Image (cartoon, rainbow, N blue to C red):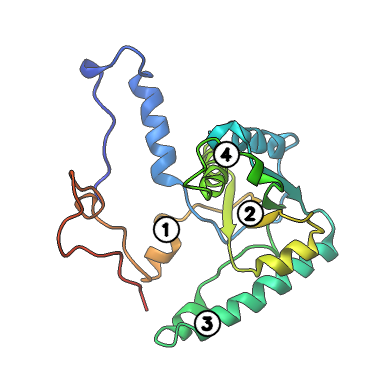
Amino acid sequence: MTPVSPPCEDTLLPHAYTPTEREALWRTLRERRDMRHFLPDPLPAGLLERLVEAAHLAPSVGYMQPWRFIRITDPAQRQNIRRLVEAERLATAQVLPSRTDDFLKVKVEGLGECAEVLAVVLMPERERHLFGRRTLPDMDLASVGCAIQNMWLAARAEGIGLGWVSFFDPKDLAQLLALPPGARPVALLCIGQVNEFYARPLLESTGWGQRLRLDEVLFENYWPAGVGGTPPAY
C-alpha cells in the first residue's frame, strides 16, 4: 500500500502539529510491528509504567476505562501461560488444513524471550456502563483495543517491541490469572527490546497475506454490490 504522506506546510490547518511532528507520527504508524523476536535485556527503569500510561490515555466509550493490566513477573506463571498458548497454537493448526505446515513455521509469540508480559483484561461489572453500549455492548472491547494500540505506538516510538498474542482459551487463562467473575482476558502482550524491527509485517514477509488497497476498504454512501469480506489465506 502506498503510504499517505502528511500535508505539506502550505496547507497547515490552525490546530495541526508542525510538519516535522506529523511526519514523526506517520513514521510511527508505518513502522509499528507485531513483534515476535526479542532480546532478553530488561526495559529501562520506568518505561513499562510509561507505556501503561500511554494505554491509559486511550478513549473509551462512556469514559468507562475498561482496561486492566496484570504484569506477569513469576517465571512459573509465565511458563503456565506459555503452555496455554502452545496448546491453542497446535489446536489452531488443526483447523487450517490447507496451510497447517505454513502456520506451524510462523512464530506466534515471544513469551520466552521478552522482558515483560502483560495480560490485558476487560474489567468485571461492565454491564453497569450503558453510555454508548445499549445497542453495541462490545464497545468495551473496542475501547481496550484503543488502549493496546496506544501502547503499541508509544512502544515503537520508544524503540521497544510489542507483540499481541491472542492464542489462548479465555476461560483457562481467566482461571490461571484468578480473575473475578465477569472479567475477561483479551490479550497477552510481549514487550521488550529487539535486535531490529521487521521491515514489513511478519505475516506479509512470510507470504501469509498482503495489506489491502485503500480502495478495497473505503466506500462511499453504500456498500458496493458484490463486494464481500477479506478472503482467508487458507
Q: CA distance from mark 4 to mark 2?
A: 28 Å
Q: CA distance from mark 1 to mark 4?
A: 37 Å
Residue annotated with mark 1: 201
Disc 1 element: loop
Any part of residue 39 in sight: no
Which residue occupies the foreground of this view, 123 or 137? 137
Quadrant containing the C terminus is: bottom left
Disc 2 residue type (three-letter): Leu
Q: CA distance from mark 4 to mark 3?
A: 39 Å
Tell me: 142 left or right of 208. right
Disc 4 residue type (three-letter): Leu
Q: Earlier in the sequence, mark 4 or mark 2?
A: 4
Disc 3 residue type (three-letter): Ala
Q: Earlier in the sequence, mark 3 or mark 1?
A: 3
Please say if the residues under marks 4 and 2 sit with CB atoms less than 8 Å apart.
no
Q: Earlier in the sequence, mark 1 or mark 4?
A: 4
Q: Please give the count of numbered marks on the rendered protein.
A: 4
Q: CA distance from mark 2 to mark 3?
A: 21 Å
Q: Which label lies toward us, 1 or 4?
A: 4
What mark, if any, has residue 189 been given in the picture? 2
What mark, if any, has residue 93 been given in the picture? 3
